[in-house]
Amino acid sequence: MKIGELAKQSGLTAHTLRFYEKQGLISPSTRSQSNYRLYSQQDLSTAKFIKRSRTMGFSLEEVEVFLSIRADKPAHICADAKDIAQQKIIDVQQKIEELQQVLVALHKLSDACCGGGESAEFCSIIDALDDSENTVTSNTTNIQEGVV
Amino acid sequence: MKIGELAKQSGLTAHTLRFYEKQGLISPSTRSQSNYRLYSQQDLSTAKFIKRSRTMGFSLEEVEVFLSIRADKPAHICADAKDIAQQKIIDVQQKIEELQQVLVALHKLSDACCGGGESAEFCSIIDALDDSENTVTSNTTNIQEGVV
DNA sequence: TTAGACCTTAGAGTATAGTCTAAGGTCAAG
DNA sequence: CTTGACCTTAGACTATACTCTAAGGTCTAA
């Protein structure tokens, strides 16, 4: 099948498939005479594998490792795959905890504010962000990535 | 005070302060004869305001809005600030839910795998990612941003 | 035979938020 | 008068994962 068909069946876009090819994740089994990419059923299952891995939250780099395990299973051990999954679990849990702390802080911030049409002269949100002795921020952890 | 001092006192870096200046968030009140940035106590409180807002999970764009409210409070109403906070709460909540779903899926994936030194020939992680009829993925939502 | 859908490539652009570099100027202490 | 810490600028680079563009070639059906 051609790239458009693979895109349709895998849920990825043709652009993304070409991008993944550049990244070394998936490549067509053959090319047509006119140089079109031609994919096999095997390729389709690889594309779905990638898509599923991404949905599970794995990075392209992690997917690459999974693919290499998948490509030569006897050369790998279960721990190779499980370690990645375990680490991802830890990462996701940590991220959730971080977000929950942010959420608590946001609620404190928001609940104190009337949110009405009144002038912001005494807006408690702005005040809380301004006041260095405010009680809203419970920690000073630097959030590296955007929260949302 | 010069930029290094402001950096120290605000918890930002000099680089970041210059970056924020380019973004229009904060600028020094004056310049020295030798063109050094000179910041006032006011500027320090603005820098802290930005830092605190970032820690709360607001984007630079959102911080910009907060700063404009802060700069001219009578021209704004509480709702201006509260709307942003409320939306951020919704965003963070949604992100948490997404991550919790991912976490459940990851646990299913990981728990099924022995994770030992055995050959990955029958690794359930790889199998689950591979099998199109697997029961691990509970939804097909496309995660736009990286999970962690 | 021609319109339209599909394919090709290299490379640029998007988003967010910094982070760093190079080449040079300033300033206080010893 | 020199050393070292600090400052200046424009602009390039990082990270992640796409997303799109331009300019052109291919294929299929009416």
Image (tube, coloured by chain):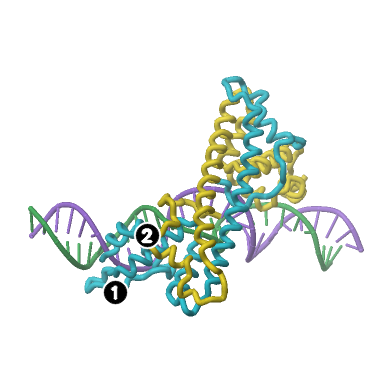
Chain colours: A cyan, B yellow, C purple, D green
Of residues C10 and B127, the one nearer the viewer is B127
Left/right placement of residue A74 relative to residue B54 reads left
Left/right placement of residue A14 relative to residue A84 reads left
Query: Disc 1 sits on a residue from what chain?
Result: A
Residue A75 % position (x, y)? 49, 79
Residue A24 % position (x, y)? 43, 70
- Viewer-nearest of discs 2 and 1: 2
Checking the image for residue A8, the label placed there is none
Q: Residues within 10 Å of mark 2 (few under 14, many from 20)?
A: few
Left/right placement of residue B87 relative to residue B8 reads left
Looking at the figure, which quarter contains the N terminus of chain A? bottom left
Kind of element beneath mark 2 = loop
Residue C8 % position (x, y)? 30, 67
When the figure is inspected, residue A86 is found, relative to residue A130, above or below; the finding is: below
The residue at the point 76 percent across, 49 percent down is B8
Checking the image for residue B133, the label placed there is 2
The residue at the point 37 percent across, 61 percent down is B132
Residue A69 % position (x, y)? 47, 73
